[in-house]
Image: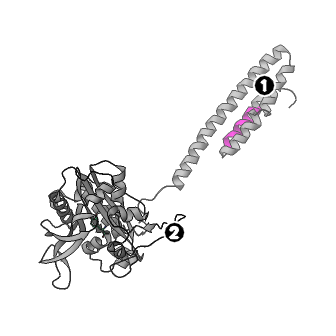
Amino acid sequence: MTEIGTMQDLEALAAEIATAIESVSSLEALEAIRIDLLGKKGRVSLMMRELGGMDPEARKQAGQELNRLKDRIATAIELRQTLLGDAALNDRLAAEAVDVTLPSRPHTEARLHPLSRTIEEVVAIFAEMGFTVAEGPDIESDYYNFTALNIPEEHPARQEHDTFYLPPDAEGKRKVLRTHTSPVQVRTMEATEPPVRIIVPGRTYRSDHDATHSPMFHQCEGLVIADGIHMGHLNGCLIDFCRAFFGVDGLPVRFRPSYFPFTEPSAEVDIGCTRDGGGLKIGAGDDWLEILGSGMVNPRVLANCGYDPEKYQGFAFGMGIERIAMLKYGIPDLRTFYDSDLRWMRHYGFLPFDAPSVHAGLVGGSS
Ligand code: DAH
């Protein structure tokens, strides 16, 4: 169009445009129409530009007409946009509707490994007694694993540990894979002032492999240090733990004299059981089962860590997680913990929502 047409022409154009807009069926096509008419080089925009060359009277008249046309187009586009938008939304809602009446897909639930579960249980029980969890490295120096714990170079206890040694470093020193969680006692005492009340669940390593030993296994260490701690605290704490963990209210617990270089005196803790009839029953009968090692922290260890043994006393204990898990859950072979056999996991594993609550422990002495 080289010059602005008559009003009839504009009316005809408006009608043609209205039909085009109404018949368009997608938002993209509608946008194309908008650009074709109102865009910078759109038909109506070009007509507007021609106004400049007209005489004032005609320009006024034509300007009004064109502005009206522009408004009508804009309104019609907006209306169509809303309609198409609603339709698109309705289509999506229909297409993506979820049929809640369909049967759900069969799925297998994951299981929590009995070792994870046992660690959670132990932590929950001691947390209720005010213990916090401490951790340390799996690769330890000889000092933390042995020397600071009063196990010097020639000590026979070193042989008993079947230690894995790493190749010597530049200074010829050989690190070890920690043979117990006890080095974390030393690390904690070095880093903090008394009072101390920690438990240390973690991986430990010894070169040993049979139905009750694995080269990698788990222990949980405990350490309590404060002014005035005595053996009565050790007894009470560990009796409460054994009863809560095995869920037997009056479970007999016995403290049997023993020896550990890092405690003096030392005691092994046994719980009452019976083996009558082939199976093991905890909490009944007159037999005993060893559960953990314990003792009053050797003053030499306190001194090695910078604590004044005249001022502070404490007790410590250590237990094998696999061992107590096997006893509690009737798992006969320790090696099966690491076989990754799904059938075993389905049998011995725990559903995640079975996780122990912190309250499962000490209330009433049973879980
Ligand atoms: N560290 C010992 C072990 O691996 C267990 C142990 C016994 C830890 C007595 C202690 C303790 O803290 O007091 O056999």
Which kind of residue does numbered mark 1 sit on?
Met
Secondary element type, mark 1: helix
State the residue at coordinates (17%, 82%).
275
What residue did someone put label 1 on?
A: 7
Can residue 355 be seen in this snapshot? no
Q: In 3D space, how far apart are the residues under numbered discs 2 and 1 (Cα atoms)?
A: 100 Å
Q: Which quadrant does the C terminus fall into?
A: bottom left
Magenta-drawn stretch, dominant element (helix, strand or loop): helix
State the residue at coordinates (49%, 55%).
97
Q: Nearer the viewer, residue 143 or 97?
A: 143
Secondary element type, mark 2: loop
Q: Which quadrant does the N terminus fall into?
A: top right
Which kind of residue does numbered mark 2 sit on?
Pro
Residue 64 at what x, y percent from top left? Answer: 74, 20
State the residue at coordinates (18%, 51%).
228
At label 1, counting other C-alpha atoms closer than 10 Å, the crowd grade (few under 14, some 14-19, many 20 or more) is few
Q: Which residues are magenta?
A: 12-23
Q: Are marks 2 and 1 in contact (CB under 8 Å)?
A: no
Up the image or down, 321 lies above or below 17; here it is below
Up the image or down, 48 lies above or below 229; here it is above
Q: Quadrant of residue 184?
A: bottom left
Up the image or down, 63 lies above or below 156; here it is above
Q: Nearer the viewer, residue 281 or 206?
A: 206
Quadrant holding ligand 1? bottom left
Can residue 326 be seen in this snapshot? yes
Q: Nearer the viewer, residue 349 or 242?
A: 242
Residue 169 at what x, y percent from top left? Answer: 52, 65
What residue did someone put label 2 on?
A: 168
Q: Earlier in the sequence, mark 2 or mark 1?
A: 1
Up the image or down, 81 lies above or below 243; here it is above
Nearer the viewer's eye, disc 2 or disc 1? Answer: 2
